[in-house]
Amino acid sequence: MKAGTLATYPLWTNRKNQANWRVFLQEKLIAFIRDELISDPDVEITADTPLISSGLMDSFALVTLQAFIEKELGVKVPAPRITVDSFNTIARMISIIDLHH
Amino acid sequence: MYTSLAFFLHLAVSVLIYWLIPRQIWRTAFLSLSSLVFLFRADANSVYLVLILTAVTWFFGYQIGQRTSKKTWHRSGIILLVLVLVIYKYLGWLDDILEPLLNLFSGFSGYHFDKLLIPLGLSYITFKYISYLTDIYWGLIKPGRFIDFLCYGSLFTIYVAGPIERFERFQPQIDNKLIFESAFLEAGFQRIVFGLFKKLVLADWLHYFFSPIWQNLAENSFAMQIVGVLAFALNIYFDFSGYSDIAIGSSRLFGLAIMENFDNPYFAVNISQFWRKWHISLSDWIRDYLFFPLSRMSDLMIWQLIFVPLIAMGLCGLWHGASSNFVFWGLWHGAGLSMLQFWGRLKRKRKEIAYLSNQPWFNRFASALTFSFVCIGWIWFLG
């Protein structure tokens, strides 16, 4: 497993560290989406910013996101779980990743 | 078929008996039997196909769920299903294409495959079963009971023209006892009437008045060609979405909520959005089981941006029929998706392009452009 990936993230088993893990995940996702996927890198992204429905990110980006989540975060999320609706915000992405971790 | 008196008589009798049965498992068994009877009357061959494919796919699904040699069972199952589809649907067409090549080699000259009679609903059932095996393999679902799976595969309301429902959505609906609600009948009846209106009034009238134009496009003036293509665009939408409404409404009479298949596709602002609104169950299938897996095969930009959309949509076109015009129609849409990805990249690189595309008028322009693109695609579809 790659060093620094979600799978090797050390302490996520108790409630406090689960919260830390979510923050870690959110930061990773925001950084990647801002740098690689959205059309306007200056826009502020929060956990609840609509990404696809607002046109900031196109649905092709979901393929790139799936690869990123698997390679960098060590979580395999099957394609039917990655939809325009389920991946429209960072918060929704985190809940899906959470389910498959 | 879904507008015939025989269909509605069969539907009415089946709905009545279905709700009189007290236990859900017997209802499911009855619905499967009723579906097989309906299919037998429409095309006896398709019943044998449903029974054999269902038994074999269920067995493969069970083996994948056992967690030993999952990959081997999954791959074998998919290969088997694709082979059945190829043998029945595409071998005759491939023979036409390959015959001149084979004739070059004297050893192969004289060999040819006969075109087989395609069993009813073959394309739909194979896609449903591929999704079933793959979803078990991906750990999204567990293998279902045989009777549930038979009902899923044979359900006569959606067997011939979809939607391509997923087992994951279907099984929970028949797993627990459904309590009868008059709302099922109201919603189902309204949806069927809506579908019949789209099909029999709008689509069939468009067909009556304009099909002489779109069937002989080349012989008409440019203005009439445009009228013909626009009429065909509306005709195919009303026809197919009308069928989907009837299928969804008929299933609702049994208390089943089948996935939606259309969502105002001609108002889409880009070709990707069009495919999220047109034949949704098929485009979701293509996305999940072709587009994503193909994209993961290589990180090369040329692969991701050009080859994946072309291959996925070319196969989507081929699924519609064993004919080169459907392949070209698919490739046209693949090229559109490819261009859209390049446009997305351009927007990220050039601020002025991103600014332009954020203007209020841009969406209206993009919508008109997408509709025109789709209409040009229908020319390929018409052949």
Image (cartoon, rainbow, N blue to C red):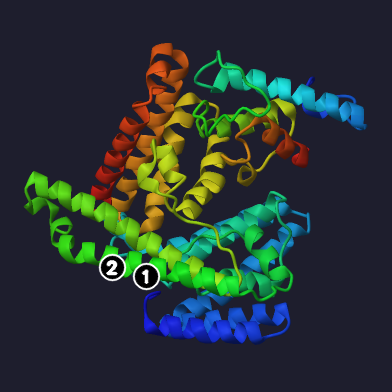
Specify the label residue B253 is tagged with: none
The chain containing the residue under callout 1 comes to: B
Q: Is residue B193 above or below residue B289?
A: below
Question: Horizontal and vertical percent for residue B312?
Answer: 45, 43
Residue A46 shows in the view = yes
Foreground pick, A60 / B182: B182
Residue type at mark 2 is Val
**Nearest the camera: B176 or B109?**
B176
Q: What type is the residue that disc 1 sits on?
A: Leu
Marks 1/2: CA–CA distance? 7 Å
Q: Which residue is mark 2?
A: B201
Judge from the rendering whether residue B76 lies leftward or rightward of residue B290; answer left or right: right
Q: Earlier in the sequence, mark 1 or mark 2?
A: 1
Q: Mark 2: few, some, or many residues within 10 Å (few <14, many ≥20)?
A: some
Which label belongs to residue B196? Answer: 1
The C terminus of chain B appears in which quarter of the rendering? bottom left
**Badges 1 and 2: C-beta atoms under 8 Å apart?**
yes
Residue at 88% across, 24% down: A10
Choose top left, top right, bottom left or bottom right for residue B292: top right
Does residue B163 sit above or below A98 in this rendering? below
- Residue A2: x and y in percent read 77, 23
Instruction: Single out the residue that lies furthest toward the right.
Output: A14
- Picture coordinates of residue A50, whole percent (x, y): 58, 30
Residue plotted at (9% across, 44% down) = B222
Which chain does the residue under circle 2 lie in? B
Q: Is residue B383 visible?
A: no
Q: Is residue B201 above or below residue A36?
A: below
| Residue B325 located left or right of residue B81 | left
Percent x, y for residue B109?
Answer: 28, 60
